[in-house]
Amino acid sequence: MSQIIGIVILIIVLALLVSNVRIVPQAHANVIERLGRYKATWDAGLHLKVPFIERVVKNISLKEQVFDFPPQPVITKDNVTMQIDSVVFCKVFDPQLYTYGVENPLAGLQNLSATTLRSIIGEMELDATLTSREQINAKMQAVLDEATDAWGIKVTRVEIKNIQPPREIEEVMTKQMRAERERRQTVLEAQAHQEAVVSRAEGDKKAKILAAEAEKEAQIALAEGRAKSIELVYEAEAAGVKMLNESKVSEGVLKLKGLEALKDVADGRATKIFMPSDISSTIANLGLAGEALGIGDYTPVDKAPNPNVDTTADPCIHPDTGKGGIEASMTTRSINHEVTTKSASEAAKTDIRSPRLK
């Protein structure tokens, strides 16, 4: 009988031990009371409580929690009523304060959030409310965090979820936004047109500059080409003169070439012919050569003064001119008269009209 009683007692003790063993999971905490008073806070791990004396008052999650509160009616500084709902992010940092600080922490946090939101929005106008969400969030987070420290709650963040103004305000805002978009569109179109005009003007300016530079380069190249051609011509003439000097051409050949040039001059295009001063001796010495070239029959040049020549019209003769100067002038005028007469007779033979030589 005693053995049976011992076995029963052992079973009861084991049952009590097993029932009073507690395993606290990670990110949780258990608040323990002994005989109705706060005893300890158990963190994550294995714990054993005293039977019939200690009890677990509350199992608290230490994770960050999110509370989405319903929309709250608030009034702005310019007397506009709107609906605003907020989201509060918080976590328990002291399980003892959370257990004994407030009866219902969630309800207390909701009411505190609503009153704080009304206080902040009441100091702002409608436009500032719609455009200052970050400022509202920061103010609410600071106020709520300070107020909930006594509850063992840490408010980490507050977000304004939605702001719903009255319908008539929405219509006015819609019209205002439409007008603002149209104004911006007009401004952008004007700026685009201005930029296009400026770009076109810049393009025309650059085109004119390039054309002017091209024209300048063309003129420079043309001038350089002309200068080079003139230089080459003079170099060729200099080379010809040098070769002529080196070949030692006789004086008769030079005079013959002069007569050939005289023939080209008397081709009928010139109205005046300037005769060299030694034309009489040249014709006298090369009479046959002149006849071969088609200038005319050889006729000895009479060096006697021509009685038909008027010496008074000679600008080279004046009262102070000596006898030798007068004879030279009369000889030159006589030769010019004879050459003119022969050229006229030759033109009559070939029936070619030519202007009269003076």
Image (cartoon, rainbow, N blue to C red):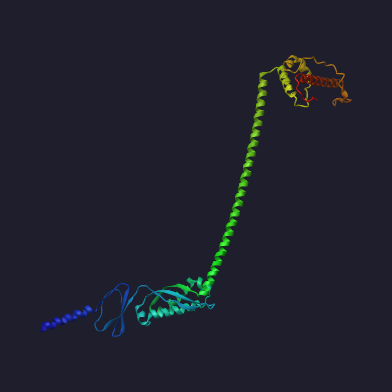
Q: What is the residue that sits farthest to the front in this orientation?
A: 351
Image x and y of residue 10, in percent: 16, 80
Frontmost residue, 242 versus 76: 76
Q: Quadrant of the N terminus?
A: bottom left
Answer with the quarter of the image where residue 16 lies: bottom left
Q: Quadrant of the C terminus?
A: top right
Frontmost residue, 164 versus 96: 164
Q: What is the residue that sits farthest to the bottom in this orientation?
A: 35
Answer with the quarter of the image where residue 324 lies: top right
Q: Is residue 51 above or below residue 255?
A: below
Indicate left or right for 275 with 101 as reference.
right
Q: What is the residue that sits farthest to the left in this orientation?
A: 1
Indicate left or right for 65 with 307 as reference.
left
Image x and y of residue 73, in percent: 47, 78
Q: Residue at x 15, y 82 (%)?
A: 8
Indicate left or right for 278 with 125 as reference.
right
Answer with the quarter of the image where residue 99 lies: bottom left
Image x and y of residue 331, in percent: 83, 19
Q: What is the residue that sits farthest to the right in this orientation?
A: 319
Indicate left or right for 34 with 356 as reference.
left
Q: Residue at x 64, y 35 (%)?
A: 224
Q: Is residue 218 above or below residue 288?
A: below
Image x and y of residue 175, in percent: 54, 69
Q: Is residue 141 above or below residue 271?
A: below
The number of numbered badges drawn on the structure is 0
Q: Residue at x 62, y 44 (%)?
A: 211
Frontmost residue, 174 versus 3: 174
